[in-house]
Each structure stands twice: as C-alpha cells, then as structure tokens.
Image (cartoon, helix red, strand yellow):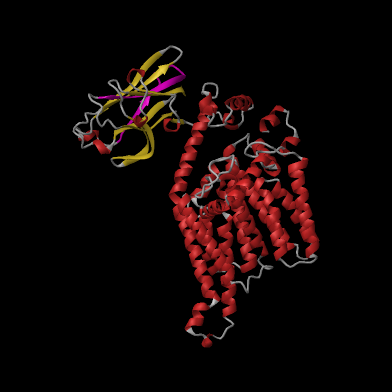
Amino acid sequence: MTIEWYDGTFEYSSIFEPQNDSRPVITNALMLLVSVITTLNIKTMFFVGYILFLVCILFIFYFVKKDSGLDLPTLVLLTPIMFYTLNPYYLSRFVSNLGAFACPILILAVLASLYLLHKSKESNGYFLCSIGMGVVCTLSGAAGLTIWFAGFVQLVLQKMHKKLEKIIIWTISAATTFYVYFVLLGFQTEGLHSTGAYNSFIETTLHYPLNKFLCFMGTVGAEIIHDSQIALFFGLIILAITIALLYVNRESLQLDRYSKWYGLLTFGILTSLEVTLTRSGALEYLGSPETIFYIPAPRHSLVIFLPILCIYILAIIYLKESVAQERTVDRKSYRFKSFLQAREHKNLFLVGIIFTLLVCSVVLHGMPGITLGEATHDQQLTNQYYLLNYANVPDEKMKTLHPIPDRVKSQAVKLEQHNLSIFASTDPEPHRVRVYWLEPDTKFASGGGILEASNYRKHTNLRIGSESMPAIFEHPQGPTGTTIVYENIDIREGSHLEFSIGIDEGVWDKPESDGVTFEIHLHDPIANTTQEVFSYTLDPAHAEGDRGWHYFAIPLEECSAGNVSVQFITRPNGNAAYDWAWWGDPKIVW
C-alpha cells in the first residue's frame, strides 16, 4: 500500500481487503499513516507497537484503580505483572514482524470496548460507543471477532438499565458484523486462512476433544514456560487455581461489579483457544490432529498473555475485599480452625501461588527471550542484506523474506525507486553480513565429493576456552578437506572479514589429532579468478598456544570484485582424526 501511495495508484478500498483470515482495516490505516510519515521505517513501527502495548498495560492498571484502588500493598502485589508483561520473551515479539504493531491495537480496542460496556449500565450513549468500539476491534485483527462473545458474557453478568434490550441489540450487532465480515465483503474458501480450514478445525475438535483440551492447557501454560510438556502441567495448575478462586469466593463473586474482568478473561481464554484449535494440528492442516503437547509460536505471545493476568488481578481484588469483610468479624470469637478456614487466608494462599507462577514466568522466559530477540535481530540484519542486494541474491535465499521471490524483487525495485524502507538512508544498515545466518550455497568434500552430514553443522553459542560465540562446524573430509561456499556476497569499499577459528576442546587431549589448516578464498565469478585471503594452522593437541578461539580481521580492499563467492576451507594437517574445526561468528563488516 505504501508503494502504491508513492506511485499515485493507491485506492482506499485496499485498506478493507482481507489479510489472511482477518480484515485489519484499523491496523492497515495506522500502518499506512506511519509508513508514509517515516518512508516505511519498520523500526519505527516496532516502537509504535511497543508504546501502544505500554498504553494497554496502563489501561489495565487503571481498571484495577477503579475497582480496588492503588494503595501500597496493591502496588506491591501488582509488581509481578509489570515484569510478566515486559519479560524478554514477550518483548522479542517487537523485533519479529508487524504483528507486534497489530496486537497492541487489538488489545487496546478490546479494553476500550469492555470499559465502555461497563460504563453503559445507565447510559445508552456509552452502550452505542461500545458497539462502535466492538466494530473497531473486529477490524483490528482476526482475534477481534472474539470481542462479541466476551462482551456478551459481560452484559449477562452485569446489572444495567434495560439489560435484555441491550443484550438483544449487542447480539444483533454481532450477527450483522459477522455477516458483513464473512459474507458481504467475501472470504477465502480454500487454504489455511479460510472457511474450509475452519471446518477442518471444528471437525478435528469434535473427533479429538481430549487432545484439544490438553493442547489448550499447553497454550495456557505457555504463559509460564515455552516448553510443550511442562506447559501442559502449568496449564492444569492455572485451571485448578481458577476453579479454586471461584469456589472460595462463590458467595461474594460480585459479578456485576467485576464484570469487565470476566469479560476480559473470556476474551483471553477464547483467543488462546482459537490459537490452539487453529495451530495445534488438524485433519488437513498443520500436522497430526492427535497432538497433546502444544505451545503457540512466539508471534502469538501477545494474544495469549491475558488469562493468568486477569485471574491474578481477580485474586487480588477478592483478597482485599475479603480482608475488609473479615475485619468486621469479632476476632475474639475466632478458633484456630476458623482462622484457617477464613476466606481471606484462602485468597491469600491463592494470590501467593499465582504470584509465584508469575515470578516463574519472568525467570523461565528471561534467557530464552534474550536469545530469541538476539537471533531475530541478527536474522533481520541478514534479511536487510538480501533486500539491499536483491538483484544478485538467489531466489532460494529471498524466500526468507517472502515465499515468492519474484514478488520481493519487484517490490524492491519500487522501494529503491521511491527511497523507501532500507533504501531511504544514504548509509543503510546492515554494516555487516553475518555468515552464520546464511545457508551455504554449496558444501563439498575433496574432489567435489558429497559432504557427509556430520561434517557440517551450526552451534548457537559454542564455548572454546573462555569465550563463547555462534559457530560453524566444518570437519575436513578427504585428503584436501572440506569447502563451504557462500555465493553473491557483496564486498563494499572499506570491507573487512572478521572471524575466529578454533579446535573443539574435546580433542585437545587426543594425541591422534595433528591439527587443521583453515583457509578462506574469494572467487570472482566474472573474471573466474580465486584469491586466497587467509590461511592458518591450529594444532591444540600439541601446542597449548593454539587452544581457545583465535580472532582475525582481514582487510578486503585488494578485492576488486563487488560480488564474490566466499569459500571457507578446512584441510587436514596430515590425518583427519579429531579435526573438529570451528569458524567462530564469521562476518563481513564495512
């Protein structure tokens, strides 16, 4: 849409076109606005999405303030929510794709709609505004359709003027919205995001109800840990806590007063259920329908984070309410048994459990989130490199940007023509190409033979000596070794090659090992010439100084070609026994 805007061919009707199984009109409009203002700066969109996410959290705290107040004990109890919602695993979502922009818009629309519904107890104006916000929510993403079910639950729970009439109007509005969304505006009938897929998901659920229930528990438990088997265990714990919370406070639920929390909880449960049913395997889609261990992908993290948050806040509210109630009871008449059975102490116990779960979520999502964020960031740098060099990058590599490479290249021409996105800068990123994130174009052994699979692999963080780094394993195979080739690498002015080499610690004590020679060659495909730019031999089994990582920076100013093949070669120094050679984070920097 941004390219069409700059081409002068943009039509406003394109904002209403479906995107997969959603019709994100509001999201599309805001994206277009930001992209036109910033010349399609994706990083800015990530920041805008993050800011909107912070607004959502503040909105939730405002809900708590209205229902329970924000005194010091409440603020202390709410502290884990901040760490939970801002843990690194969720935040890595904001350097992934533009869903990080869309999800906060959706959540903000949900919060606004439910708040307006709560305010509509005595006001028809607020009620009409809530319906309008429900439409906005629907047009903010596929999960937005769930607002109509969440709103219905809230209307049923809360006391209000002309309640039956409002429920009927809300239901008619929902039915009308669904009709316009799926029928009047048209919808896909084939593919993963279609009515045909929906039928398959429903049929799978009817055939495997227990499997889908366990998958749903895994989705709920993924709020604590992203491990499919352990998440199932945590999901069952959260279900048990929810049942216990409702049972303990069964005589004082005050559903009218806290209806918006139950509406928000309904929304969170239903969106988590939707992710489960549509992504955990079906009769014709996404793997085996008999799956029982399942967790959503990281990109769905912002859609599933609400349930435990709502349960915890309800637990805090009921705790404070039960404490206030128990203070009116004559303490002198208490017996020890009565003390243990007091509702405030049961609520305190439940709050403590959920508090612990949230702390566990922060801890268990800490390093995985940082690792995921770093990996996503580095992959994005690689994608930027591919986009900048779209004319020379093979189609297979362009698929990391989009499944249809020709579409990427045709759009890249337009981006460059209008100086959009990465082409808007006179000194665009990336200033480095990390070989670790590229897939080799060719791998072969001596004489061009087929390389055995065990002689090439990657390690995300290999430790040799006192240092750890991403590394590429290349074991020499045959008398002249192994060659790994990366084609179409852009060598710019001022480029130099940075890397480390090392022999695995596991072979330092092997007398059979006689070392490895590491070489790097640059091949000019136009002139058909090859230049050796690096050669070094390590033999840590016999030379202690060769142990650990060894860092090198090789200037490439003598390389005349602008587009070359980089060849990483490991050769046996005699025999190939225990030649466990590693290239440490090789990259071209300028």
| Quarter of the image where one finds residue 126 | bottom right
| Quarter of the image where one finds residue 193 | top right
Residue 268 pos. (x, y %): 61, 55
Q: Is residue 491 visible?
A: no
Please, is residue 266 above or below residue 338 in the view? Answer: above
User: In this view of the protein, which residue sits in the foreground, 218 or 15?
Assistant: 218
Left or right of 431 in this view: 325: right
- Given the current orientation, which residue lies at the most extreme front position? 207
Residue at (29%, 36%) from the top-left corner? 504
Of the 4 image quadrants, the one containing the N terminus is top right
Q: How many numbered marks does the figure carry?
A: 0
Left or right of 159 in this view: 72: left
Left or right of 205 in this view: 128: right
- Dominant secondary structure of the magenta stretch? strand
- Given the current orientation, which residue lies at the most extreme bottom position? 332
Of the 4 image quadrants, the one containing the C terminus is top left
Q: Is residue 257 magenta?
A: no
Residue 395 pos. (x, y %): 53, 24
Please, is residue 174 above or below residue 564 in the view? Answer: below
Residue at (48%, 53%) from the top-left corner? 231
| Quarter of the image where one finds residue 468 | top left
Residue 145 pos. (x, y %): 69, 49
User: In this view of the protein, which residue sits in the foreground, 285 or 442?
Assistant: 285
Q: Which residues are magenta?
A: 549-572
